[in-house]
Image: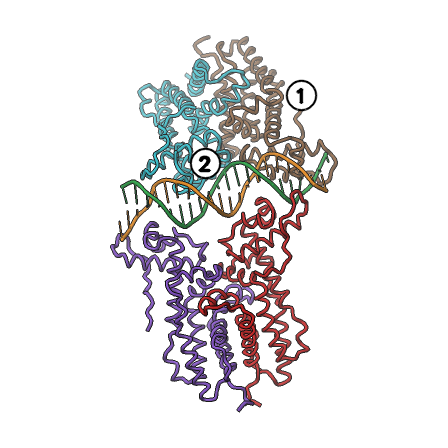
Chain colours: A red, B purple, C cyan, D brown, E orange, F green
DNA sequence: CATGAATGAGATTTCATTCAT
DNA sequence: TATGAATGAAATCTCATTCAT
């Protein structure tokens, strides 16, 4: 599994570094939850992974659920950070949009924890997300980027007029998400690893092309 | 046509009907697994849901894992049955393909258990799927349908030549799957139920249009 | 400690005697709660005392609190049974009342669990008692007995007219209860066991005489 | 007159006032022990209640048991102070004794901590009381008062000759104690708060009258 | 085939106490 | 004197599985 956050290995005993300990626990929790889900994760394993006594996990996070919520917030923070693409506008609307789709796909590949935690949270009907400090997706910068690119595309008479932003966002995300979320069952079905670089490249092309083809003003409408 | 086992609800106690009991247990298991995942599901709850003693569940399915595999097979059977669309060809390649995309989306909406069980099975890296009696996706009839429609589209000079079937299959599934799999977190983020009919209709249009737009031969290539 | 209920010792494994197991667990629980209170009692110890796996205790009683409520109900049943004195009337009102006071004292001495569980339950402000199937004291037969004896005493011009039944009940109970409840601290303070037979006899006399002296019509009122 | 340590509420943080901190901790401990008993009390909660770090509680009192013993000593100090009634003699033996009974009752009502801690200490068979710096009840001034009043009553030919002081002390205490100790279960059983003023007044009358009636020389013995 | 009481291993959580600062 | 992070042992509770009936 790809690890992005620097993961502190076992901390030495006697340390009085509350923030460090919290970070180590959170990192271990994200790993464990990503691997086994909420119900399948073991607090023992998380404590061991953080190099910390089990009691400290409860001291800092209260309960398994509390830790889950913290992990969720972490995943959403990653999502927001990963989608904060401000440099796309210079590419123009068509190539900008294609890059956006590619970037979303790349984000899910780089951060399987986002995919895994979201899947699990949907199993719980987003119960914990509502308890999280803020529903973080609301400030999703991706939305703003999409709207800017759409406006530019319409102004240059390149894009269709009637695009529903939400639907476009969902479609673009779904194209990348599914490939990652179902990596293993798809690989089993197709009898070959979906994550071989050339397969990824092929799919990335398709996915970008699909978004762009959809957005482009039909030829006959000139 | 492929048949899926009819799932009976709650049996009345004392019935001497081994097959009925098995079906009731499987149905209860699918419900429980869909709701809580593999680790979160409770054998007690499954027995209660089937109106059956706990021991009988083990008698018929051996273990929780055995029951999970049976539930997975059931989900895949549903998937195959739902994608067995032989009547599409008469619509022609473009409309046939659009209908296929719509149908896939509709299947996931109608059977959340497919989505939930697949997600969970991916958490386990498809370990059980490989243990299932047959890897059922291999004879996926959807593939055949797609290839038939693609061939027709190419023959009529409507579709692009270079379509990767697997990528198309994944993209088409992903567009529908994500919307269902992430129903709750997306609804929380967008502050409104994603499953209101008009929203579904909007998305279905986008999804179908996206597939068709991608496949269509570029205007300039006539 | 004096044990009244026949306590089943360790049951042999594999027994399929749910009622027997429940009774054994309850008996062990009453012992443990009497000894250590609600918070101090150990479920492990109760299971061991009943010769039963820990899980079975939870299977039958749900939680420590559930077991506590069952123990409370048991104590109240003992109280009711012990106070069901129907044979007192033949002694006449004065001696009947004295016997009643003696009997109440004797009941608390014979059943320290009543005293201990009530004390603890008061610590919890009777929270569990309200959750018990029925507030069992309401049908307290002692009340009926007291009222019958009072009526007889008044009819024979022996008792004062203005007796508050509730207050009399509380006073009579208190005289016996305190002696048992505070056995250990009083013994420490008086540097000698309060439960030596001659001390008990002395106190029993005082307690009976006090009740009777209170009830008796003042000499000058003839 | 005997002084009882003034119990301060919550201290402001950072104060350099060791005695103040000790007093605050003790006060919080008495509250917590009164509420939850020895086993049920939480050191965390006591520290929080005292506005002090947990470590400081251990620094000053060594252990939970040490704190419990201190709390017990505090309760016994209250008891002694409350029963230090030197002004009763002027009322004469009969009214003096009645006032004594009332005063004892009032003391238990005003200080539930005395009742609660004594109950709990009896659960432990007065184990800690013996470890307390001095067994404080031994110099119980109430005893002296009782004996003085009894002597006066006998001298005036008002009281019976054969009164056992210990038994009288126990009876008098028990009448008041039980009413307070069993406040909640009795209130539940009688479906009404026992601590409503008119009920207290009724009981106080009964309790005083009972003591006096017992002590009074029988009419026929003139 | 069917029951559900019973188990035992292991899960989450609690909490008095210690200790680096 | 004072803090509060950290520990470790032990508590309550869970749950897949077994087994006598």
Q: Residue furthest left?
A: B16
| B100 with respect to B23 (left or right) | right
Question: Residue B141 has which mark?
Answer: none
SS class of the residue under badge 2?
Answer: helix
Discs 2/1, front? 2
Question: Residue C44 has which mark?
Answer: 2
* Neighbourhood count class around disc 1 (C-alpha, 10 Å): few under 14, some 14–19, many 20 upward: few
User: Which of D196/D75 is in front?
Assistant: D75
Locate the N terminus of chain B and report the quarter of the image it occupies. Answer: bottom left
Disc 1 is attached to a residue of which chain? Answer: D
Q: Quadrant for residue A207, please give it.
A: bottom right
| B167 with respect to F7 (left or right) | left
Q: Quadrant for residue D78, please give it.
A: top right
* Neighbourhood count class around disc 2 (C-alpha, 10 Å): few under 14, some 14–19, many 20 upward: some
User: Can residue A128 be seen in this snapshot?
Assistant: yes
| D210 with respect to E20 (left or right) | left
Residue drawn at x 68%, y 45% as measured from the top left: A16
Picture coordinates of residue A65 (x, y %)? 54, 52
User: Which of C199/C96 is in front?
Assistant: C199
Q: Is residue D91 above or below residue C143?
A: above
Q: Is residue D92 above or below residue B114?
A: above
Q: Quadrant for residue C147, please give it.
A: top left
Residue drawn at x 51%, y 56% as measured from the top left: A37
Question: Residue D1 has which mark?
Answer: 1
Q: Is residue C54 above or below residue A27?
A: above
Picture coordinates of residue D34 (x, y %)? 56, 33
> Are the residues flagged by discs 2 and 1 from a single subunit?
no
Total marks in image: 2
């Amino acid at each position: 599994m790809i690890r992005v956050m620097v993961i502190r290995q076992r901390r030495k005993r006697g340390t009085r570094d509350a923030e460090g300990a919290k970070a180590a626990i959170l990192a271990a929790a994200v790993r464990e939850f990503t691997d086994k889900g909420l119900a399948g994760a073991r607090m023992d394993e998380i404590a061991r992974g953080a190099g910390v006594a089990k009691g400290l996990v409860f001291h800092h996070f209260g309960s398994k659920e509390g830790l889950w919520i913290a992990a969720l917030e972490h995943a959403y923070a990653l999502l927001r950070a990963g989608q904060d693409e401000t440099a796309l506008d210079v590419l123009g609307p068509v190539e900008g949009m294609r890059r956006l789709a590619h970037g979303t796909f790349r984000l899910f590949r780089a951060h399987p924890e986002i995919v895994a935690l979201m899947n699990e949270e949907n199993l719980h009907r987003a119960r914990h997300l509502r308890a999280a400090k803020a529903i973080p997706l609301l400030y999703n910068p991706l939305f703003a980027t999409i709207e800017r690119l759409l406006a530019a595309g319409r102004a240059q008479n390149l894009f269709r007029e009637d695009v529903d932003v939400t639907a476009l966002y969902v479609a673009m995300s779904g194209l990348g998400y599914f490939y990652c979320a179902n990596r293993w069952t798809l690989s089993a079905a197709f009898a070959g690893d979906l994550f071989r670089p050339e397969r990824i490249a092929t799919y990335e092309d398709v996915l970008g092309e699909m978004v762009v083809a959809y957005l482009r003003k039909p030829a006959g409408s000139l």
